[in-house]
Image (spheres, rainbow, N blue to C red):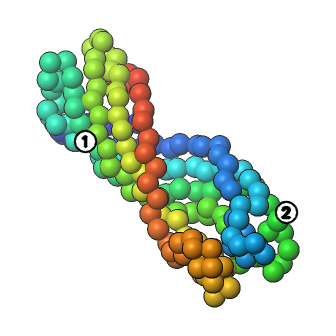
Amino acid sequence: MRARVSSPLSLEVGATFVPAERWVLNPIAESGPMIMDTVSANWLRADFGAQVGLTGARTWNGIHPYALIGGGLVFGIMEGASEVMAPPEMETFRYDISTAPHIYVGFGFEVFPSETIGIGFEVRDYLIRLSAPDGFLSQQALQAFESTGGPAPDASTYQHNPEFGITIWYYF
């Protein structure tokens, strides 16, 4: 949902549910860090942001270009569990999305086939902060990553998640 607050500025709120899957990585497997399983990793993203119309409230040749910026939270919901990570000694290696902050930037344009209908085309890049499980930062796991020549995990990092969208807007 988006509401105009001034000529160039609109505020928006949104929510997105994504059913997804993720790989389960065992960093201390005997043959080195390896993918052991695939589990569900469903998540809900809640956004709050601003759209800045580059031409104000007007259009340029029937096109309304705009820039986007915002942020919010990602919540892991209905996350699957792997039997590979079920033993108690693997607890520190279990990953869950939990709650993670994100920011986004983007741009787009809207065309108007009628006075009450708009069709928006946009690109956004969501930067989601992910944290590694504590076990991935243990001496044992770091040595396993080093022995295979793989990169050591960071305690937390922002991951790029580009999104392309086509939206139909109804104005009243």
Amino acid bearing label 2: Glu
Q: Residues within 10 Å of mark 2 (few under 14, many from 20)?
A: few
Disc 2 secondary structure class: helix
Q: Is residue 130 left or right of residue 136?
A: left
Amino acid bearing label 1: Ala
Which residue position holds label 1? 67
User: Toward the viewer: 117 or 33?
Assistant: 33
Dot in front, 1 or 2: 2
Q: Is residue 43 left or right of residue 70?
A: right
Quadrant of res 146 = bottom right
Q: Can residue 78 be seen at all in this image of the molecule?
A: no
Which residue position holds label 2? 83
Q: Is residue 44 left or right of residue 159?
A: right
On the image, the x and y values in percent for residue 10 come to 27, 40
Quadrant of res 88 = bottom right
Q: Residue at the spot x=62%, y=64% of the render?
A: 98
